[in-house]
Amino acid sequence: MTIIFIRHGESVNNQPDRSLHTLDPELTARGLLQAELLGERFKEIHLDALICSPIKRAMRTANEIARHKDMPVAVYHDMVEIGTEYLPIPHSEALKICPYLMPYDVPARIGEYGDNYDLDIEDPYYSLSRAYRVISRVRQSFPEEATVALVGHGAFNQRLIAAALRISFPPDYIFSQSNTGVSVVNYRPNEEGRTITRLVVMNDTSHLYGKCEVT
C-alpha cells in the first residue's frame, strides 16, 4: 500500500495578518493556484482513493485533484486539524466546495475528533493516537496494493506521517509541511515476506517550482 499525504493550499489563516483569520478560512488566490497546480500534478498519477479533512480548505484542495481525475472524495472527520475549532457543514453545503464529495454524516459530538472541545487534554500524544486511528482505518479499508491520498493539514499531517511510520512524535519534533506539499509512505513485502515501511518522499512541492511561490 502507498499512502500519500498532502497539505492544503495556502489559506487566509496562513497569512501573517491575524486580523484576517477566521474560524474556517478559505484558500487565498495563491492557495487556489497551488491547488490547481497540485491537481495537474496528480492528473496522471494512479489513485485508488482520495480522502480529505472535513474543513473547507482541505475540501477545496482535494477538489482540484478530484476535478483533474474525475474521481470521488471521501471525508474522514478524524482528519480535522489539531486544536482547530470548526463548524462542520452538512454534505449539501460541502458539495458547493467540492462537488465530488461522497455522502457523509455530520458527527454528533465534534469533541470526538478535535483536540480542544471541552476535553481539557494535556497529553501531547492525544492527536497522535487520533492519527493512528486514521492510518489503521486506511490500511484496513483498502487492498494491500492500493494507493490512497489524504488531503489534510500541516500539524496533523505530521502526526499522520509519524503514525504511518509507527514512530513516536514528541511535541518538539517537526516534519515540514508546506502548502500542497506531498509526502509518501509505502508498505511493501521484502523477499522474506515481511512488510517493510518506507518513507519515499517528504514535503515535495516541485509542482509549484517556477509557477508559484512555495510557502
Image (cartoon, rainbow, N blue to C red):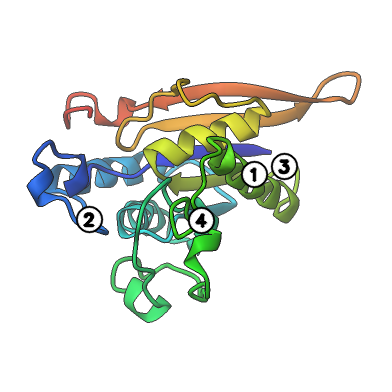
Would you place residue 210 above or below residue 77 in this image?
above
- Disc 4 or disc 1, which is closer to the eye? 4
In the figure, is residue 52 to the left or right of 56?
Answer: right
- Disc 4 or disc 2, which is closer to the eye? 4
- Tell me where residue 24 appears, x and y as whole percent: 27, 59
Label 4 environment density (alpha carbons within 10 Å; few <14, some 14–19, many ≥20): few
Could you say which is closer to the camera, residue 155 or residue 59?
A: 155
- Tell me where residue 53 appears, x and y as whole percent: 44, 55
In the rendered structure, which amino acid carries the disc numbered 1? Answer: Ile
| Label whose residue precedes the other's in the sequence (3 or 4) | 4
In the rendered structure, which amino acid carries the disc numbered 3? Answer: Glu
Q: Pointer 3: what residue?
A: 145
Residue 119: mark = 4
Q: Pointer 2: what residue?
A: 25
Label 1 environment density (alpha carbons within 10 Å; few <14, some 14–19, many ≥20): many
**Whole-Å distance between the Cαs marked 4 and 2?**
24 Å
Q: Pointer 1: what residue?
A: 135
